[in-house]
Image (tube, grey):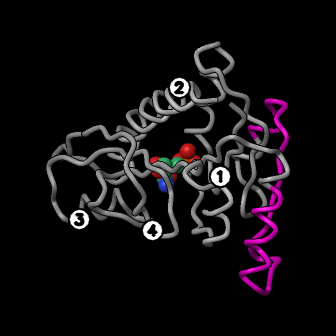
Amino acid sequence: MRIVVLVSGSGSNLQAVIDAERAGQLPIEVAAVGADRHGTYGVERSAAAGIDTFVVNFGDYADRRDWDDALRQKAASYRPDLVLSSGFMRIVDERFIKRFEGRYINTHPALLPSFPGAHGVRDALAYGVKVTGATVMVADAGVDTGPILAQAPVAVLDDDTEATLHERIKVEERRLLIETLAELSRKY
Ligand code: GRF
């Protein structure tokens, strides 16, 4: 199963996928890693691992539609079976969703449909929930609204900060992501 991974940040979840693949635990090929901005550690670590990388820099496009065109075409050029959003902090348009219908996978650091959006961990803490968690889903054109593939709970501790809670959630997020990719890979 060929995958293209999109990142906006450090790509620690992506690293877990690369490690699992290199350890022979995941029958996938990371065909390329792309970012929406320059200077991400996700792209840096992928290049260091010998993986093809690309940047479709959001700031370079005056028209949002042109950025979407460029991203879709670049991702499609690698002929992926699956596109994985791994901490990719941009919503893509309907044409991207259509092009990779049911094959664009995302993760979220909360138990959807609770706490969607860019601050899932912070919002769960602020609300005062005692349990939050991680979700892997098929991405659609909404914000964290696609069909859910897997979820895992994480207890919120009294002294948690956004950072400590997010780290524990990411442990579950990575485990779920790898399990889900392994399951999906059986289809290809
Ligand atoms: C993950 O928790 C993801 O769900 C969220 O940002 C985090 C990505 O971290 N949107 P990293 O870039 O994989 O380290």
N-terminal-most mark, 3 or 4? 3
Specify few, some or many for label 1: CA neighbours under 10 Å numbering under 14, 14-19, or 20 or more: many
Q: Nearer the viewer, residue 162 or 46?
A: 46
Residue 36 lies, in percent from the top left, at: 72, 63
Q: Is residue 22 left or right of residue 178?
A: right
Q: Name the residue tied to disc 4.
A: 143
Q: How many marks?
A: 4
Q: Name the residue tied to disc 1.
A: 7
Q: Name the residue tied to disc 2.
A: 182
Secondary structure character of the magenta stretch overall: helix
Q: What residue is at 66 percent from the left and 64 percent from the top? A: 96
Q: Is residue 30 left or right of residue 125?
A: right
User: Mark 4 to mark 1: distance in Å?
Assistant: 16 Å
Of the residues shown, which amino acid type is indicated by label 3?
Ala
Of the residues shown, which amino acid type is indicated by label 4?
Val
**Element type at marker 3?**
helix
Q: Name the residue tied to disc 3.
A: 126
* Residue 167 in the image: above or below residue 188: below
N-terminal-most mark, 2 or 1? 1
Residues at discs 3 and 4 in contact (Cβ within 8 Å): no
Residue 169 lies, in percent from the top left, at: 36, 41
**Element type at marker 4?**
loop
Q: What residue is at 67 percent from the left and 70 percent from the top? A: 95
Q: On the image, which quarter does residue 187 sit in?
A: top right
**Span colored in magenta:** 45-74
